[in-house]
């Protein structure tokens, strides 16, 4: 099976590289996505590749609904009649984050580049690989004469925009999908490349664009400063309402939750697998991490809220910055939330905190942005825990590990409500330095092959326990 997976991935890489070359920016970053056609091109490319795979009984549909980004829906019948009443749902997405320049010399967001074990380019690891991994794993089960239940593969195209179109699609598609026994999501992180990492929780997100305006024109800074309050000073005061700038603590009550004791213990066990979470990045010499140790870093990333300013309009580039008073600012905020926090309640509390009694009577408004629920996994049943460990030993040579992640996958929160009794397996290839959403994003090829083989193992184990 491993040989088959390796060979199949060799054949799939050219198509994945073609996909990387398509600037299929998520609708939040390409409001004219229906006109530019990049998402449609990426979907058609993956649809055609999937349709060409020799998997018995498979159907591949590109679901189109006016006003919504497309969804790819792949259905594969069970290998045996006694498994026909059991369903595995597999998930990924094909939309991408924007460019985030600058990339290193010779690399670019829409330029697929193979260097050793790494395939560089936007979207390969997040999350274009997912449909390839899913179908190669299914084909591998057939190759070795294995068994699997009915399988549905869902690939959406608005995940990087908090899955704004997915709920409408699911309303139509869930009756076709049915109730799944097992959900496999291929859009997560791995804390290292030396073992299988499974994800036990994802954070929610509440975002928005904060508009501040104090003056109708843009006067000379020498005349207006000291006479009018600048929008930048007002921004500093407003952010102090929702975050302690000295500690990073988020001050919104609804954004802070009690961390379950078993998640605290889980983070402590996971922390033993690597020296510091911050070592996954490249902080400059002398920069101090926010957590005292790896355990605290994991809890900060997965179960504590954190605010980030991710975009600003109204500040010119330094080279073009003349002596002009800052009359207005638009600031994009992203507030990551614990898995069990009420995303909508946090968003409303944040709005109230920022808009109430504006400093100096300025015009202040928070416009809604990305909002996505967090999610916490139910405990693995014995069969799933066993196959995860066995697959990690088989394909990596080390035991598996589990922890939460700091990112958001809105699909998990949506599905968790409709399928509370399912088992959920979240895996991914976004490991150290893989730079999801940033410059020099890459897909680690040995890891994607091992994750694919793991999916094949899990599908067969699921079929065994269903029989």
Image (cartoon, rainbow, N blue to C red):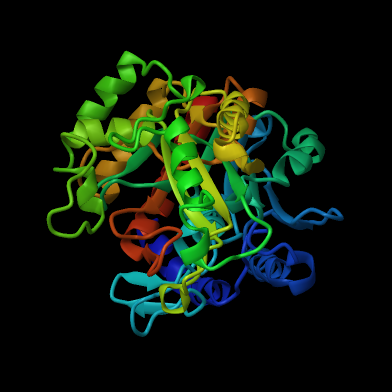
Q: Is residue 72 left or right of residue 235?
A: right
Q: Is residue 3 above or below residue 422?
A: below
x, y percent for residue 458: 44, 39
Q: How many marks?
A: 0
Residue 456 visible in this rendered orientation of the protein: no
Return the residue found at the far right: 66
Residue lying furthest bottom: 106
Residue shown at 47% from the left, 67% from the top: 100
Most foreground residue, 319 or 405: 319
The answer to whether 222 is drawn above or below residue 82 in the figure is: below
The residue lying at 28 percent from left, 34 percent from top is 247
**Depth order, front residue of 333/396:** 333
Hey, which quadrant is residue 69 in on the image? bottom right
Which quadrant holds residue 150? top right
Q: Residue at position x 67%, y 64% from top?
A: 30
Left or right, 451 with reference to 299:
right
Residue 96 lies, in percent from the top left, at: 57, 61
Measuring from the top left, give residue 138's x and y in whole percent: 54, 51
Q: Residue at x 63, y 61 (%)?
A: 29
Residue 85 visible in the picture? yes
Left or right, 402 with reference to 19: left
- For the N terminus, the image quarter is bottom left
Q: Is residue 456 above or below residue 351?
A: below
Question: x, y (%) of residue 278?
Answer: 23, 47
- The image quadrant where one finds the C terminus is top right
Q: Nearer the viewer, residue 27 or 309?
A: 309
Position of 341 with respect to 356 (left or right) is: left
> Residue 295 versus residue 239: which sits nearer the camera?
239
């Amino acid at each position: 099976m491993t040989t088959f997976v390796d060979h199949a991935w060799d054949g799939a890489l050219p198509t994945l590289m073609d996909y990387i070359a398509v600037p299929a920016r998520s609708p939040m970053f390409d409001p004219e996505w229906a006109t530019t056609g990049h998402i449609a091109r990426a979907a058609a490319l993956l649809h055609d590749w999937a349709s060409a795979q020799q998997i018995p009984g498979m159907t591949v549909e590109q679901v189109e609904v006016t006003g919504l980004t497309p969804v790819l829906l792949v259905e594969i019948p069970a290998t045996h009649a006694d498994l026909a009443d059991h369903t595995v749902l597999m998930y990924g997405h094909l939309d991408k984050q924007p460019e985030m320049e600058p990339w290193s010399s010779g690399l670019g967001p829409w330029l697929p580049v193979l260097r050793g074990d790494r395939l560089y380019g936007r979207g390969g690891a997040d999350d274009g690989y997912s449909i390839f991994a899913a179908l190669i794993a299914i084909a591998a089960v057939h190759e070795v004469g294995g068994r699997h239940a009915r399988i549905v593969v869902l690939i959406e195209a608005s995940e990087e925009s908090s899955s704004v179109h997915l709920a409408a699609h699911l309303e139509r598609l869930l009756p076709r999908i049915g109730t799944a026994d097992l959900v496999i999501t291929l859009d997560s992180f791995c804390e290292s490349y030396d073992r299988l990492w499974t994800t036990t929780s994802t954070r929610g997100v509440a975002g928005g664009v904060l508009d501040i305006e104090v003056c109708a024109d843009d006067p000379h800074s020498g005349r207006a400063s000291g006479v009018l309050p600048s929008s930048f000073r007002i921004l500093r005061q407003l952010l102090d309402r929702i975050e302690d700038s000295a500690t990073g603590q988020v001050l919104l009550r609804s954004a802070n939750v009690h961390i379950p004791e078993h998640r605290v213990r889980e983070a402590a066990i996971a922390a033993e697998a690597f020296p510091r979470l911050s070592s996954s990045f490249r902080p400059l010499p002398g920069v101090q991490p926010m957590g005292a140790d790896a355990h605290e870093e994991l809890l900060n990333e997965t179960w504590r809220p954190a605010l980030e300013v991710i975009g600003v309009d109204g500040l010119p580039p330094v080279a073009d910055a003349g002596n002009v008073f800052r009359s207005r600012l638009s600031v994009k905020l992203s507030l990551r939330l614990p898995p069990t926090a009420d995303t909508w309640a946090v968003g409303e509390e944040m709005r109230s905190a920022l808009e109430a009694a504006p400093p100096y009577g300025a015009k202040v408004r928070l416009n809604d942005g990305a909002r996505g629920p967090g999610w916490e996994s139910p405990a693995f049943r014995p069969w799933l825990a066993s196959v995860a460990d066995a697959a990690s030993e088989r394909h990596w040579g080390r035991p598996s590990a589990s922890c939460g992640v700091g990112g958001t996958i809105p699909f998990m929160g949506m599905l968790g409500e409709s399928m509370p009794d399912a088992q959920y397996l979240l895996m991914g290839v976004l490991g150290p330095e893989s730079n999801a959403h940033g410059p020099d994003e890459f897909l680690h090829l040995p890891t994607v092959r091992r994750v694919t083989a793991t999916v094949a193992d899990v599908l067969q184990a699921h079929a065994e326990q269903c029989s």
